[in-house]
Image (cartoon, grey):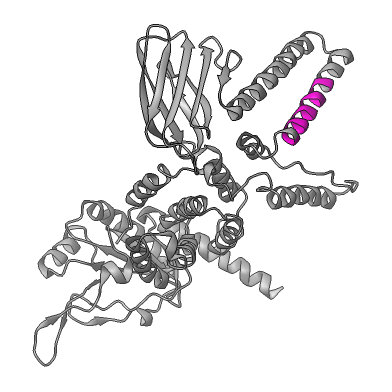
């Protein structure tokens, strides 16, 4: 059974979109006037990660460019966008529920004037001041292209220093505001000098290792993971993806370790739920072989282990999912699969003498299985010379269909199994293998690759990649033996 994270995301979205910080007055009123638009519709939406927005209100723009977002319930606090015609949009902070603004489509930022929201006044003033500095830099950069003089370079360096000092002073003066947290969250860690001369190749390697370790260690320093408002910004999702995609070794153990480290900082209830969900959904059906162990770790520790964060249905489904996946993780011995061959004899997988055993689990009526079968027949011609055995196991218990499939695709060279067993006392057919829950078969075909000890070393590989994978694994194993020998 596959858990539908789409269903889970909808429930989370519903909860997160209706959470708001305490306000003395219920309802929201945001009035806008934008020169350059008229007689159209605008939308107010909050971010839910960088690639999803949740619309909270719509408003009609009159002939003067005026519109009014209004409602009788507070908006959940966070970073919102106002979507305008022709793909334009502008960000605003929703904390105070009653404010107004005026601006112009010629430049939504520099023309902005805000009334009634100190956060937004600070937010737009920061952007306006930074825009002024960057405009100066653009002019100087153009001048340097035409005349690369020391004077121009000196001016550029001076303005860059002014920008750095401005940002430092601004962060100090706006401490405690949400806009301060937003700007901090977008900043990268500042790496101190290495402090050692780089003379040899080893010194250079140490330098890069120092930079990486410092950057990773301090990656979350500027991000307040106690503030639930960050789930309604684009920054948290980007930060998570950067950390796990680029800074974390893609093995189950490393992913689990980094998950524990990051979640130890996530004290806000909603931000914690969001982060758990995002990481778990990445590794339930991972793109990289063997990282589903990370999903099991997250499910056990942060869904089943923290049941008060979730509804009972979600916790129950996670328990069921862990029960299915845990015995099938990379490195585990394949659970017992009870099969008989075309002569009715029992197939004992642990007794198969082979360096590698491929288990191809299929349904004779499955379209994808029928596409894969000729590829399997072709692949086996190369695999059989490498002491690789293949077992094709039908989940359909209809002998006629099973044997027709074997004949149709000329698969007589490989071993075939079906879960049909005759009771010696009653003579009745009995079935012992639960393919769905015992082997995670929610779609077919499914491939498991076993080593000589019948431990799982790969699963869900496309048939056409089997020979390359086995060659790679064999070479890797030989290299490890050589290292141990040394």
Magenta stretch, main secondary structure, is helix
Is 484 situated left or right of 89 in this image? Answer: right
**Is residue 311 in view from this perspective?**
yes
The part of the chain drawn in magenta is: 158-172
Q: Magenta span has 159? A: yes
Residue that appears at 62% across and 50% down: 247
Observer-nearest of 486 and 35: 35
Q: Position of residue 117 (x, y in %)?
A: 57, 27
Rendered view: 162 above or below 280: above
Quadrant housing the N terminus: bottom left
Rendered view: 328 above or below 169: below
Residue that appears at 43% across and 53% down: 281
Q: Position of residue 142 (x, y in %)?
A: 73, 11
Q: Position of residue 248 (x, y in %)?
A: 60, 53
Residue that appears at 57% across and 54% down: 266
Rendered view: 243 above or below 162: below
Give the residue at the far bottom of this rendering.
425
Q: Position of residue 14 (x, y in %)?
A: 36, 45
Is 4 situated left or right of 246 in this image? Answer: left
Observer-nearest of 23 and 245: 23
Q: Magenta span has 452? A: no
Residue that appears at 83% across and 22% down: 157
Quadrant housing the C terminus: bottom right
**Is residue 392 in view from this perspective?**
no
The part of the image, by quadrant, that contains residue 187 is top right
């Amino acid at each position: 059974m596959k858990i539908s994270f789409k269903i889970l995301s909808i429930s989370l979205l519903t909860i997160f979109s209706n959470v708001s910080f305490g306000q003395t007055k219920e309802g929201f009123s945001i009035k806008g006037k934008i020169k350059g638009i008229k007689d159209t519709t605008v939308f107010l939406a909050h971010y839910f990660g960088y690639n999803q927005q949740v619309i909270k209100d719509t408003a009609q723009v009159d002939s003067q460019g005026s519109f009014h977002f209004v409602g009788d319930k507070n908006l959940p606090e966070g970073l919102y966008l106002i979507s305008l015609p022709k793909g334009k949009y502008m960000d605003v902070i929703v904390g105070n529920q009653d404010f107004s603004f005026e601006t112009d489509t010629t430049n939504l930022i520099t023309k902005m004037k805000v009334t009634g929201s100190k956060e937004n006044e600070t937010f737009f003033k920061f952007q306006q001041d930074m825009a002024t500095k960057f405009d100066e830099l653009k002019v100087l950069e153009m001048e340097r292209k035409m005349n690369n003089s020391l004077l121009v370079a000196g001016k550029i360096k001076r303005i860059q220093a002014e920008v750095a000092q401005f940002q430092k002073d601004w962060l100090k003066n706006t401490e405690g505001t949400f806009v301060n947290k937003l700007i901090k969250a977008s900043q990268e860690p500042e790496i101190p000098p290495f402090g050692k001369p780089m003379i040899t190749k080893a010194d250079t390697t140490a330098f890069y290792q120092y930079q990486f370790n410092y950057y990773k260690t301090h990656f979350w320093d500027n991000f307040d993971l106690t503030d639930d408002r960050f789930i309604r910004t684009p920054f948290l999702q980007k930060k998570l993806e950067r950390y796990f995609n680029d800074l974390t070794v893609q093995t189950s153990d490393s992913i689990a370790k980094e998950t524990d480290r990051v979640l130890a900082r996530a004290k806000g209830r909603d931000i914690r739920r969001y982060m758990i969900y995002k990481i778990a959904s990445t590794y339930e059906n991972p793109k990289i072989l063997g990282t589903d162990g990370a999903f099991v770790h997250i499910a056990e520790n942060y869904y089943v282990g923290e049941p008060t964060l979730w509804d009972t249905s979600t916790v129950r489904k996670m328990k069921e999912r862990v029960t299915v996946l845990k015995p099938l993780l990379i490195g585990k011995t394949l659970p017992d699969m009870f099969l008989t061959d075309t002569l009715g004899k029992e197939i004992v997988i642990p007794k198969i003498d082979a360096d590698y055993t491929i288990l191809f689990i299929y349904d004779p009526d499955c379209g994808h299985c029928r596409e894969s079968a000729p590829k399997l027949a072709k692949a086996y011609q190369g695999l059989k010379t490498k002491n690789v055995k293949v077992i094709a196991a039908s989940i359909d218990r209809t002998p006629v269909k099973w044997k027709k499939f074997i004949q149709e695709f000329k698969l007589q060279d490989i071993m075939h199994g079906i879960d049909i067993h005759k009771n010696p006392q009653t003579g009745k057919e009995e079935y012992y293998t639960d393919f769905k829950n015992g082997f995670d078969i929610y779609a077919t075909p499914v491939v498991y690759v076993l080593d000589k000890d019948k431990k799982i070393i790969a699963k869900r590989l496309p048939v056409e990649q089997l020979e390359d994978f086995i060659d790679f694994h064999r070479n890797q194993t030989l290299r490890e033996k050589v290292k141990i020998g040394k």
